Image (cartoon, helix red, strand yellow):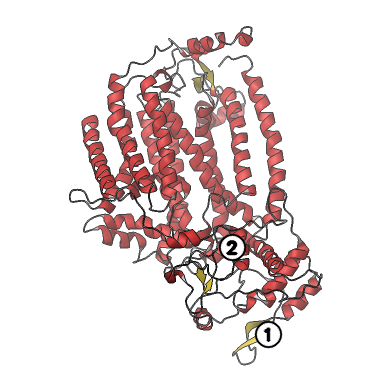
Amino acid sequence: MSFPWAKNYEPQHPLMKYFDEKLPLPRLVYNAIGAGYPVPRNLNYFWNFGVLAGAALVIQIITGIVLAMHYAANAGVAFNSVEHIMRDVNAGWFIRYAHMNGASMFFIVVYLHIFRGLYYGSYKAPREMVWLLGVVIFLLMMATAFMGYVLPWGQMSFWGAQVITGFFSAIPIVGEPVREWLLGGFVPDNATLNRFFSLHYLLPFVIAGVIILHIWALHIPGSNNPTGIEVKDEQDTVPFHPYYTAKDGFGLGVFLLVFVALTFFSPNTLGHADNYIPANALSTPAHIVPEWYFLPFYAILKAFTFNFLWIDAKLWGVIAMFASIALLFFLPWLDSSPVKSSSYRPLYRIFFWILVADVFLLGWCGMQPAEQPWVILSQLGAIYYFAHFLVILPIVSRIERPLPLPNSITEAVLAKHADKPSDATA
Amino acid sequence: MVRPLGFLVGLGFITALVLAILTTPLSNEENVAHSFHKHPRHLKLASDGLFPHWDKAQLQRGMQVYKEVCSACHSLHLVAFRDIADLGYTEGQIKTFAKGFQVPSINPDTGEPATRDGLPSDYFPSPYANEVAARAANNNALPPDLSLITKAREGGKDYVYSLLTGFQNPPANLPKELQPGTGLHYNPYFANLNLAMAPPLKDGQVTFADGKPSTVKQMSADVTAFLVWTAEPKLVKRVQVGWAVFLFLLIFTGLTYLSYRNIWADKKH
């Protein structure tokens, strides 16, 4: 698309020529994910996760559509209709477990995709728009996953809905009316379940739409790569097809192996036992926790235990939790270093790995009851999280002396192979 | 503009968190009940692990325990009589078994509520007409439905087995406020230590057709195995299908790896 040496789509067959004149859809595909899209030749396996996230969305949509054929979004029967799928629908247990664990797989690959973007500086110019659209997709995914978890109408569904919609009641004055408006009642009930089902069916298609924009925006500058330096000429690139279609095919195989192992051999490991108890507004579970992919943010929410200034602790927690994701929108401008890849940023790299450890720590704390030492650990973890993005990163990107960059992608590739004598003749 | 503003926002959050740390006590309120609480004991069943199967003799014994003991208070409303074909019963046996239950019905002549003999398509009937009746008969405690119990409790089958075998006299050093009150029974595997269910099993309570001695341990293990089946009748099939899919994908992934290497053979990267 953007490089002058990109191959041009030339239909041979008369039918394809006719098609190309009337509706150039094959041309679009060719230029997007075919031989017409030149990609840096040095991408590592971390560049597989974008395609895998797309595959996860497709799996969720297909299994979800089938589930919707058998599920009943009514508070009286929702729980039993899920058990009906598990027991009486042909292969229903498979479809339901695949959808349930597919959500986890979707988040695993998206978190790895975000990790890749953070480590190799894919959020920086000229790819800011790709990053911003990615954060939008992430937010939509979180909303979709939350509403999906409510649908089986178990105890965690109900109390999760109660807690999450409760965030809005922390807003002064309008909070409580807003919460009631969102729920369609004073507590989660049939109105809530119905609207969550409707939105849970809608949002994946909105995600698919934003993904199209995400890929479109990516194709303007082309893909980033592990060196973070831009493509200079043709020898830096290979056509997407067959090179990366083949590599993504292998990546998809590995992804499916993990997915299948989880779905068939251990489908309830990432879930919560309480969600096999039907929702009961009169019985609060001892310990309400969200799904694993929300735990770091949940830990940040719970870390604020002090009424500071005129804002009470609960509102601080809610603001901080939303801010912890919203600050990602400003990342391209918080990090002013022109060097993208952390491989050439010795100082930033140290803080980056601390951030990774910090997110795991927050996730672990999010799972624990509100007891010490988990409270202070989540408070320290939250301090580092905000300090990293809002204080350390802007300073580091100003004072850091990056390592010397290679002149081109090809030079970096050849230098890597020169280190390995076994490749000398290859 | 973004960086100075971000810096201020960051300082705001950090200040709030530092103050939160300074004002949160570092010690926990002591939870005495916690020190008496025990972790569930492991119960090994044929349906465990990566190569599971149903031990049909055990499931049949377990269903007998459910029918003769548990079903006095606990429903099993997700399981139909037809489902017990999985346990190795023939169609005729299932029909006879179902006939042994009375299920709610309507008198076809008058429309009055009535009961009739169970059919294979009926579900295990509930022991109580409704929640109020169940609570009235059980000192205001509600016996939970058992269909999903091994999936609906932390610790799963191990928890159910430990609870059934874990009734005992309270330890001598148990503080007064944790002593079982009227109608409560001490059990260290239960989160509150005291539960409303009386010890349901005693040695020799049922007579197994296969001659197995009916000790509390044996009956508990058998009924737990049965409840693992009721919670997920498709468990064994799930793992078996899983192996076929996994091995297919392993070959598929191996081929995609070879084609990837082949396509990239002439490109350094």
Can you identify the residue that label 2 sits on?
A83
Quarter that holds the N terminus of chain B: top left
* Foreground pick, A398 / A426: A398
The answer to whether any part of residue A129 appears in the image is: yes
Residue B96 position within the rendered picture, expressed as x and y whole percent measured from the top left: 77, 78
Any mark on residue B116, and which?
1
Question: Is A281 positioned to the left or the right of B90 in the image?
Answer: left
Q: How many marks?
A: 2
> What's the mark number on residue A225?
none
* Disc 2 and disc 1 in contact, CB within 8 angstroms: no
Compute the Cα span from label 2 to label 1.
26 Å
Evaluate whether residue A23 shows in this view. Answer: no
The spot of residue B43 in percent (x, y) is: 66, 58
What chain is tagged by disc 2?
A
Q: Nearer the viewer, residue A252 or B110?
A: A252
Q: Residue furthest bottom?
A: B110
Chain of the residue that carries numbered disc 1 in the rendered image: B
Relative image position of residue B12 (x, y in whole percent): 23, 40
Badge 1 marks a residue whose secondary structure is strand
What residue do we see at 51% from left, 37% from top? A109
User: Residue B74's quadrant in the figure?
Assistant: bottom right
Secondary structure, mark 2, is: helix
Amino acid beneath label 1:
Arg
Q: Provide residue B70's location: percent of width, then percent of height.
A: 64, 74
Q: With A211 as the anchor, is B143 left or right in this view?
A: right
**Neighbour tally class for label 1: few under 14, some 14-19, many 20 plus, Cα within 10 Å:** few
Q: Residue furthest front?
A: B172
Three-letter amino acid code of the residue under disc 2 = Glu
Residue plotted at (47% across, 14% down) = A409
Q: Residue at image x 72%, y 70%?
A: B215
